[in-house]
Image (cartoon, grey):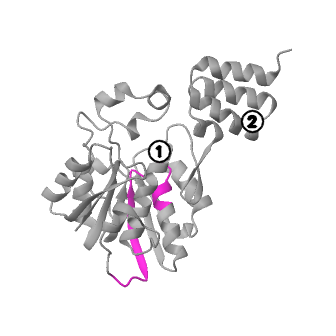
Amino acid sequence: MTTGKDQLLALLKASGDEEALLDLKILEEEFEGNALEEAVKRRASGEPLAYILGYRHFYKECYKVVPGVLIPRADTEIAVESALKFLGLNKMATGDLLNIPPYGRDLTEIRFADLCTGTGCIGISIANEIVRSGIRAFGTLVDISDTAIAAASDNVRTQAVKPEDISVIKHDVLGGAPNLEKLDFIVSNPPYITNKEMDELDSVVKDHEPDLALRAGDTGLDFYGPILNIAKALLKDGGALIVEHGYEQGDPVRKIFEQGGLKKCMTIRDYGGNQRVTVGIK
């Protein structure tokens, strides 16, 4: 006799998505009965697991994730590690992270912005580590998407150690700098997928995650110049701009930073050995 589980397995196998088979165990732990059947159908159709569950673990927190907001990736944790190394708070840094120069200031409070924040996972994770170290952190999470603003606001309330010190604002980074006080660092995971790469993306990403958070023109570099200009306007002298990018974009992003006047520009590889984050100092 065919059981409900057998039917679910057959449905996933028919989808041809091997990762979906691995996700079945998680779905079975989270749902039961009709809810499980519906969740498996959604996964078999190609919908990402994080949207079905409504959350994704990132760094030390668990962030709310909703359709219309980019799903946090483990590779992006390198941006968190880079910011903490710059602030002198990453005692376990290894590899390329060791090359990031320390801020060198005796700080009792730190002000920063997370541009194109999405779920808010980067900025909230950094702020929490700063607070845990005994330093006050004032963060501003910035996005143009109303869906992202709502998700980031929810995550500030539920995941931030000091939610009262983190604000979420709507602003288009392509339109210039937001009205903020001078900052110690800026971090961003902007869109960086080229138009050609968008056409070639796996359907799980292309058909479900927001184009607004992925696409960045023919070169994939549309956001780095405007973000650099924001950094030049808002960073304190000695402050850092820290951005994520594609695995082949380290050289062009460093060039943008250097031509824009940033110093000590360097690219940090993720734990898979891919170029992932570039840092420049004002």
User: In 3D space, how far apart are the residues under numbered discs 1 and 2 (Cα atoms)?
Assistant: 32 Å
Residue 94 seen in render = yes
* Crowd around label 2: few <14 · some 14–19 · many ≥20 (10 Å): some
Q: Which residue is mark 2?
A: 28
Residue 172 image point, x, y percent: 33, 48
* Sequence-earlier tag: 1 or 2: 2
> Do tag 1 and tag 2 residues touch (Cβ < 8 Å)?
no
Q: Nearer the viewer, mark 1 or mark 2?
A: 2
- Badge number at residue 200: none
Residue 103 colored in magenta in the image: no
Is residue 220 positioned above or below 238 on the image? above
Q: Secondary structure at mark 2?
A: helix
Residue 181 seen in render = no
Residue at the right extreme of this rendering: 1
Where residue 262 sits, quadrant-wise, is bottom left
Q: Secondary structure at mark 1?
A: helix
Instruction: Looking at the picture, tell me which residue is in the foreground, 181 or 116.
Output: 116
Is residue 136 positioned above or below 177 on the image? below
Image: magenta residue range: 105-124
* Crowd around label 1: few <14 · some 14–19 · many ≥20 (10 Å): some
Residue 277 image point, x, y percent: 34, 54
**x 36%, y 52%: residue:** 171
Q: Which residue is mark 1?
A: 146
Residue 121 colored in magenta in the image: yes
